[in-house]
Image: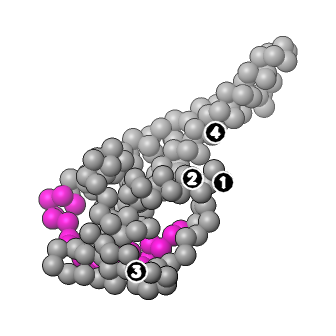
Amino acid sequence: MGTKGKGKKADKVKRGKKAIKVSKVKKAGPGKKRAAGVVRAAAKTAGKMSKQEKTKIRAALLNERQRLLGDVSRLQEDNIHRSVREASGALSGDPSENVDEEYARSFSMAIAANKQEALQEIDEALDRIDEGAYGLCEICGEKIPQKRLSAKPSARTCLKCAEQMEAEQRE
């Protein structure tokens, strides 16, 4: 679809009958936002998603968001109960049992943090739907395959770019 330019020339992202110039942007380091602004700007003039598709995807994302919110709430409640038991001295005098309790609490907190991150990804996906940039890779600007979006509706990148990001993070 897109044609790659040489050096710092602009790329063209072709959507439907339109070709949109997308400036090359240096990749940010791990954890930093990439060239999302440029790709989103291109997406606004690119081929749009149907209302029915948007509604279906939004509903799936909102359902997943509700499920995650419930999970986070339960995990936080469980951690509060553990902390209350610990503060009240209800824990055993056996140090090995106390270590197990501490491990369970820290494990539960890590799971809650992962679910919070997933919630943030879902919120960002909902924003991309509103902006008209949903389904476009934030790095290369190409359309993300439907199979990938079905597996991970909050996907920000195509599989090729996601693999490149993972390889960069390992280096």
In which image quadrant can residue 114 be found? top right
Numbered circle sitting on residue 35: none
* Residue extent of the magenta highlight: 33-54
Q: Are marks 2 and 1 in contact (CB under 8 Å)?
A: yes
Q: Position of residue 134 (x, y in %)?
A: 31, 64
Label 4 sits on residue: 109
CA gap, disc 2 to disc 4? 28 Å
Upstream in the sequence, badge 3 or badge 1? 3
In the structure shown, which secondary structural element does the residue marked by tag 1 occupy?
loop
Q: Looking at this view, is 164 or 146 the one in front?
A: 164
Q: Amino acid at mark 1?
A: Glu
In which image quadrant can residue 10 be found? bottom left
Q: Are marks 3 and 4 in contact (CB under 8 Å)?
A: no
Q: Looking at this view, is 78 or 12 the one in front?
A: 12
Label 3 sits on residue: 5
Residue in view at x 20 percent, y 81 percent = 18
Residue 104 lies within the magenta run = no
CA gap, disc 3 to disc 4? 46 Å
Upstream in the sequence, badge 2 or badge 3? 3
Nearer to us: label 1 or label 4: 1
For disc 1, the neighbor class at 10 Å (few under 14, some 14 to 19, many from 20) is few
Label 1 sits on residue: 171
Upstream in the sequence, badge 2 or badge 4? 4
CA gap, disc 2 to disc 1? 7 Å
Q: Position of residue 89 (x, y in %)?
A: 80, 24
Residue in view at x 39 percent, y 41 percent = 67
Q: Amino acid at mark 4?
A: Met
